Image (cartoon, rainbow, N blue to C red):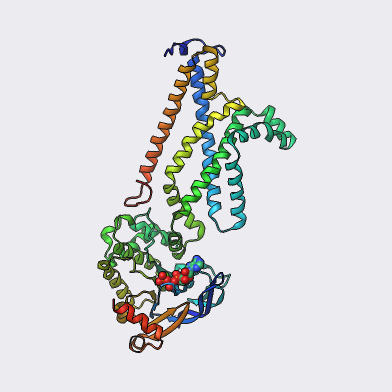
Amino acid sequence: MDFSFLSQPAFSGGGTYLDWVISGIKWTLLVSILAWIIAFTIGSVLGVLRTTRVAWLRTPATAYVELFRNVPLLVQMFIWYFVVPEILPKALGTWMKQGMPMPEFWSAVLALGFYTASRVAEQVRSGIQSIPAGQTQAALATGLTMPQVYRHLLLPMGYRIVIPPLTSEFLTIFKNSSVALTIGVLEMTAQARTISEYTFRTFEIFSLATVVYVLITLAVTVLMEFVERHVRVPGYIGTGK
Amino acid sequence: MSMIEFKNISKWYGSFQVLKDCSTHIDKGEVVVVCGPSGSGKSTLIKCVNGLEPFQQGELIVNGQSVGDKTTNLPQLRAKIGMVFQHFELFPHMNVTANLNLAQVKVLGRSVDEATAKSQMLLNRVGMIDHAHKFPGQLSGGQQQRIAIARGLAMDPVAMLFDEPTSALDPEMINEVLDVMVELAQEGMTMMCVTHEMGFARKVAHRVIFMDKGEIVEDAPKADFFGTPRSERAQQFLSKILHH
Ligand SMILES: Nc1ncnc2c1ncn2[C@@H]1O[C@H](COP(=O)(O)OP(=O)(O)OP(=O)(O)O)[C@@H](O)[C@H]1O
Ligand SMILES: [Mg+2]
């Protein structure tokens, strides 16, 4: 393997191919982390709504999850990029296409965020529902209201229970961010493809891309293990370790 | 004066009637033991008292308020009624003090210092002060149940409900919990206890209620119940639990 091409001046843009790789990493991280913020926030709200007994809150949340979870991510990416600007009110649609900076980037963030939200929602729901009903009854019996029971019991325990599956969703979002290349986001995989076209160093550049993804996921795993250790409940069996 | 009054309470799960026209009362300072075979509706009956289980017919007055009334503020009513469960149901992610403080702070609006002082007083009383900073998962069942009782008492309740508080415990831990309950009864706490601990009933109960298939079959002063229970079902039940 010969990685000397990385220091060569790139075909365009003035920098080297290494600069392209770094830029690819930057966009992969940006798309993934912003999408995760959306996914975690909206997914948590939807997951909680799916556990309430109030039908008019539960039903829309269930509909969202079923819709977003069952349409392929690639299709959702195309819809956010090509279709959404057309069906929005005209002024807003035109702005998305022409005025909005980096339309492909924001479309990718929204697509990946809203898609992953449906998966996070399912994890949060299952975490809350795995808490025995007696716990909720005991909390209500002390005079807490249902929102207080969520705030002080169901959410803190529910999140702890689902840290392992949530970690796996967080890892998946970095891998899924490569789909953004289909709408023109120059993230890591897109850069690897372009560089291989210009330099014919296909083997080297995709090996490098592999290492980059592995390092990112390792970092996430370490971070989540830290979180898990930090919130571990002494003596509690059931959170895995 | 009745602290808790059941007037012809009926409840259904679909077409299955779990409570059949149940009427009884628990006076202030009275200790009433509820017993009966598994599935007879004891838990359902006791959970009606603080509105954890809704019912479809009848009226239930607790501390002067109608539980079934839509306008009754259930959280406020529940705050005055302590409840202890078979499986303790302490909050696993909070230490013992935090378990006792939570509702004092969030429901009664006590300051954390006030709540902690109260919690320490009660932990002392149930013999758990040395464990104030432990988590429920680090304690034995008997210890957890004593803390659960202290959690109920921390709200200065007007009555305490117990749903089989000792039936999930290893035999050697039953007495440490019963001792706390006996002491509470002797201090004049109003108590409704679902339990099969007939020793406890003999010692402190004023009345014993026997339920079977959703019905209150016997409702008698302790002496009468253990002397000459009127129904055959109660007699059979008593001989079963007393002779094993
Ligand atoms: N959510 C429910 N849906 C349908 N049936 C129920 C439900 N909860 C309880 N039941 C039924 O109602 C009946 C009374 O239940 P309950 O728990 O009150 O009995 P119990 O006397 O407390 O019994 P145990 O001694 O086993 O605790 C049982 O036959 C039970 O199967
Ligand atoms: Mg029961």
Extreme residue in the right direction = A90
Drawn side of residue A193 relative to residue A221, left or right: right
- Vertical position of residue B43 compared to residue A155: above or below: below
Image quarter of residue B225: bottom left
- Vertical position of residue A7 compared to residue B27: above or below: above
How far from the left and from the top, in percent, is residue A75?
Answer: 62, 34
State which quarter of the image contains the C terminus of chain B.
Answer: bottom left
State which quarter of the image contains the N terminus of chain B.
Answer: bottom left
- Vertical position of residue B177 compared to residue A89: above or below: below
**Residue B175 is at least partly visible in this image:** yes
Drawn side of residue A3 relative to residue B10, left or right: left
Drawn side of residue B118 relative to residue B217, left or right: left
Image quarter of residue B182: bottom left
Q: How many marks?
A: 0
- Residue depicted at 50% across the width and 50% down the height: A125
How far from the left and from the top, in percent, is residue A231?
Answer: 38, 46
How far from the left and from the top, in percent, is residue A2?
Answer: 42, 12
Image quarter of residue A108: top right
- Vertical position of residue B244 compared to residue A158: above or below: below
- Residue depicted at 37% across the width and 63% down the height: B87
**Residue B52 is at least partly visible in this image:** no
How far from the left and from the top, in percent, is residue B93?
Answer: 38, 53
